[in-house]
């Protein structure tokens, strides 16, 4: 029997600090408020209806998980004050007593069971893929079983936000999305889509009320407009400061610039099916490894960083950062496939595509830093080896539904992926596992990549309770993926924020702006 136990301590309940904002609610004379300029509006406020960054930021204000992910990516107690692995496949979670939902109802084990059951049927089912059963032992104890030993279940549960069973059942999914009820540090006051989301402090929050009484999030999609909103005083903090505006903001002593290396890896997903929907040829050229290698070698990530990102990005060496399980020391995508247009051209000819081909690239125009400029640069670079990119750009509100597996409309996709769990397996299992082979796996495999050896290694990683064994299996997956090139990593963004000097904020490693850790100095 294994006996791993984690106990909450008062000093370590929240180990992370982060960044956020809010706006004063009428009638509060001495209230502290902050307004934050986000890159976009939330897509939804139901945490099981999909995910993307702006939505995720709001989720964690309104809801709580059983396990809290701290600002430095460590994990600690959340709604569960402790947990214990009682045998190889059985976890027992002890819940906090006296926690209240925003509607005054007490949080109990039945809410956890309801949340996990609903999760299994949702768009976020991958988060429960390694849960075989769950039940309430009593009102404040939940038992969760995994189908095999699984070392990182608590990490997965940090992304599972607990719903109020009674409210969701009575209100229905649509109302629960528009008017969410959670246990989190903030309550929803108003959501005017594409204009603002206003929150007020939950004075009954189990860890104590937030320093900020109210927070308002405003979607401002244009980078220059976000900077202007800060400099004119319309907002107090902005996310994704335009890289071209860094020096301008730094020069004004009323404001400060904050940065944090990002976990978000901007990548190109390559269709691996024999027939691809946007390529008017009998066979998909990108199935040929030589064509994929040519694509990598034709992309000058250094030029993208220097010219488009103003030096504020870091080229992706692998699919996950060096801090994560599955990272392979000493391996570099750029060393394996250095920028070389001449070599890329020769590979295209060798593969029988000297005259090239045309393919559509699906991408956002308002989600990633300078995403529109990046895809235009990619079109120019790949054009030099006669791969003609047709750019299909769209706002993120349309994009993620358009590319959602199994929509199968795409041949080439530029998107981003981050792994805040610190575990490469959480990415590999959804992005590279064979689609439709195993429930909860391959759900974001946008290129239809399939390699039985990769599947087997992921299965082994997910069947060990030893983290060092898991790391080794995932490193073996990394080796295969770097050789196969089912996806081209471009760069990691640099998370850039700007704020008024009286806003006390510290960027988090996971890019979540959590108002609970922010204060405004008088």
Image (cartoon, rainbow, N blue to C red):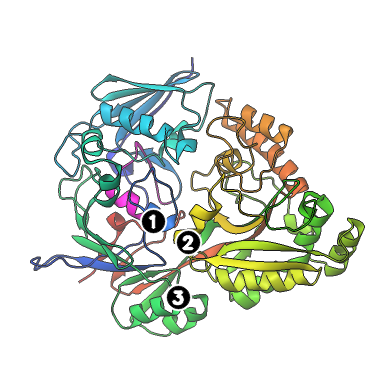
> Which residue position is annotated with label 3?
223
Dot placed on the residue nearer the N-terminal end, 2 or 1: 1
Where the C terminus falls, by quadrant?
bottom left
Foreground residue, 34 or 399? 399
State left or right for residue 99 relative to residue 501.
left
- Are the two marked residues, 2 and 1, in contact with CB atoms closer than 8 angstroms? yes
Q: Which residues are the magenta region?
A: 57-71
- Percent x, y for residue 138? 25, 19
Nearer to us of marks 3 and 1 is 1
How much space separates mark 2 and mark 3, taking CA atoms?
15 Å
- Percent x, y for residue 270? 69, 53
- Are the two marked residues, 2 and 3, in contact with CB atoms closer than 8 angstroms? no
**In terms of image quadrants, where is residue 219?**
bottom left
What kind of element bears circle 2?
helix
- Percent x, y for residue 181? 23, 45
Residue at 44 percent of width and 44 percent of height: 74
> Which residue position is annotated with label 1?
43
* Residue found farthest to the top: 1
**In terms of image quadrants, where is residue 28?**
bottom left
Dot placed on the residue nearer the N-terminal end, 3 or 1: 1
* Mark 1, other Cα within 10 Å: few <14 / some 14–19 / many ≥20: many
> Which residue position is annotated with label 2?
396
* Mark 2, other Cα within 10 Å: few <14 / some 14–19 / many ≥20: some
- Percent x, y for residue 367? 49, 64
What kind of element bears circle 3?
helix
Residue at 74 percent of width and 41 percent of height: 480
């Amino acid at each position: 029997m294994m006996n791993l136990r984690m106990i909450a301590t008062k000093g370590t309940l929240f180990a992370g600090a982060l960044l956020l904002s809010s706006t004063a609610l009428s009638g509060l004379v001495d209230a502290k408020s902050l307004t934050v300029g986000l890159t976009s509006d939330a897509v939804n406020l139901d945490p099981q209806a999909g995910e993307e960054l702006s939505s995720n930021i709001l989720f964690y204000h309104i809801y709580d998980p059983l396990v809290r992910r701290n600002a430095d990516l460590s994990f600690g107690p959340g709604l569960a004050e402790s947990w214990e692995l009682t045998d190889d496949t059985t976890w027992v979670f002890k819940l906090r007593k006296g926690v209240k939902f925003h509607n005054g109802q007490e949080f109990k084990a039945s809410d956890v069971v309801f949340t996990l059951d609903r999760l299994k049927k949702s768009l976020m089912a991958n988060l429960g893929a390694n849960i075989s059963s769950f039940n309430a032992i009593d009102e404040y104890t939940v038992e969760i079983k995994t189908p095999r030993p699984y070392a990182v279940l608590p990490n997965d549960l940090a992304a599972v936000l607990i719903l109020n069973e009674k409210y969701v059942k009575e209100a229905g999914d649509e109302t629960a999305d528009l008017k969410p009820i959670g246990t989190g540090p903030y309550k929803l006051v108003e959501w005017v889509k594409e204009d603002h989301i206003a929150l007020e402090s939950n004075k009954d929050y189990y860890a104590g009320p937030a320093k900020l009484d109210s927070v308002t999030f405003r979607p401002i999609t244009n980078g220059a407009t976000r900077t202007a909103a800060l400099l004119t005083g319309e907002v107090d903090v902005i996310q994704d400061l335009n890289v071209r505006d860094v020096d301008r903001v730094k020069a004004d002593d009323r404001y400060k610039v904050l940065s944090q290396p990002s976990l978000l890896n901007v990548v190109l997903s390559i269709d691996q099916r024999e027939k691809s929907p946007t390529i008017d040829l009998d066979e998909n050229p990108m199935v040929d490894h030589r064509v994929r290698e040519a694509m990598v070698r034709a992309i000058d990530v250094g030029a993208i960083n220097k010219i488009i990102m103003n030096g504020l990005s870091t080229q992706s060496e692998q699919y996950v950062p060096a801090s994560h399980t599955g990272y392979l020391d000493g391996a570099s995508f750029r060393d394996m496939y250095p920028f070389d247009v001449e070599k890329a051209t020769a590979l295209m000819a060798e593969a029988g595509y000297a005259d090239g081909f045309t393919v559509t690239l699906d991408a956002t125009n308002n989600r990633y830093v300078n995403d529109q400029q990046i895809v235009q640069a990619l079109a120019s670079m790949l054009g030099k080896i006669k791969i003609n990119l047709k750019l299909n750009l769209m706002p993120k509100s349309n994009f993620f539904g358009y590319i959602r597996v199994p929509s199968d409309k795409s041949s080439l996709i530029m998107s981003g992926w981050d792994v805040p769990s610190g575990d490469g397996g959480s990415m590999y299992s959804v992005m590279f596992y064979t689609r439709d082979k195993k429930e909860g796996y391959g759900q974001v495999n946008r290129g239809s990549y399939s390699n039985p050896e990769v599947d087997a290694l992921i299965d082994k990683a997910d069947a060990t309770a030893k983290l060092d064994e898991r790391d080794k299996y995932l490193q073996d997956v990394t080796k295969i993926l770097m050789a196969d090139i089912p996806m081209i990593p471009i760069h990691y963004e640099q998370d850039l924020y700007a704020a008024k000097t009286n806003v006390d904020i510290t960027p988090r490693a996971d890019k979540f702006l959590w108002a609970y850790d922010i204060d405004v100095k008088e």
